[in-house]
Image: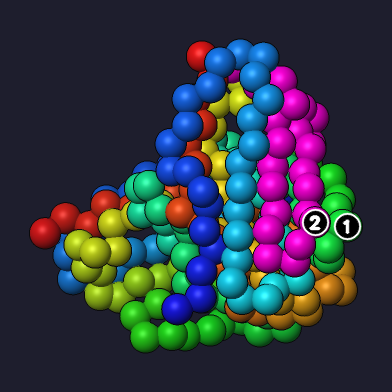
Amino acid sequence: DVKVTQSSRYLVKRTGEKVFLECVQDMDHENMFWYRQDPGLGLRLIYFSYDVKMKEKGDIPEGYSVSREKKERFSLILESASTNQTSMYLCASSPHGQGARYGYTFGSGTRLTVV
Amino acid sequence: DQQVKQNSPSLSVQEGRISILNCDYTNSMFDYFLWYKKYPAEGPTFLISISSIKDKNEDGRFTVFLNKSAKHLSLHIVPSQPGDSAVYFCAATPPTSGTYKYIFGTGTRLKVLA
């Protein structure tokens, strides 16, 4: 069964900490995405990557950065965590050119709380 | 600027009846539309999609209808089952090549009552 695995289900971090959220996929997908889900706001795209070492900003990139050193791994970095970054973070992947019809494969999410 | 809107945050339906979830969009250039289902503490799972050149797509109990003139999308679930209780997101993608960046709606929480 194909999988997108997010390393942590729940995280609690302090304001100002540097936070790493890890995502690994085993489907050899080119595209990987980071979204956050908030009540009443749906899923909003933070960053995405269409190839190793390639990245593009999504709709809400402020306060975040990403790293993709290997095809299967896409990391989201909160440079200095703030309370307004408390959210559910979802990683997803899709193959190049097929994502529109067949959708993304999502991980189970990381619930991050910044205190 | 919300390009994909789900105006009903919640919906309750009796088991066995039809569930209709609605979605409106503003960009007539959207290429594909998709529906996702999300259970608590899990990631969204892909349900069904429809191309902008079609007006209907069916998969078992799930049918998606697209009305391009009204910029309206709906998901019909017949018959509804208690296991269908979840949050449903509609999503749309613009006609870009390669990387498809979906724009999601805010979600509708469906509760199917036994």
Q: Position of residue A105 (x, y in %)?
A: 56, 67
Q: Mark 1 — residue?
A: A54
* Separation (CA) of disc 1 from disc 2: 9 Å
Identified by mark 2, the residue type is Glu
Q: Which residue is mark 2?
A: A69
State how the image is colored. Answer: rainbow
- Residue B87 percent coordinates (x, y): 40, 52
**Secondary structure state at the residue bearing disc 1:** loop
Q: Is residue A46 magenta?
A: no
* Number of residues whose C-alpha sits closer than 10 Å to that of mark 1, classed few (under 14), some (14–19) or many (20 or more): few
Query: In the rendered image, which quarter is residue A99 located in?
Result: bottom right
Residue density around tag 2, few if under 14, some if 14–19, many if 20 or more, within 10 Å: few
**Span of residues in magenta:** A61-83
Q: In this picture, is B28 found above or below B56?
A: above
Residue sitting at x 53%, y 22%: A13
What chain is tagged by disc 2?
A
Q: What chain does badge 1 belong to?
A: A
The reply to whether dot 1 and dot 2 touch (C-beta < 8 Å) is no
Q: Position of residue A3 (x, y in %)?
A: 51, 69
- Seen at 53% across and 84% down, the residue is B57
Q: Amino acid at mark 1?
A: Met
User: B2 or A50, which lies in front?
Assistant: A50
Disc 2 element? strand
Name the quarter where the N terminus of chain A is drawn.
bottom left
The residue positioned 28% from the left and 57% from the top of the image is B85
Compared to residue B64, the image places residue A58 above or below, namely: above
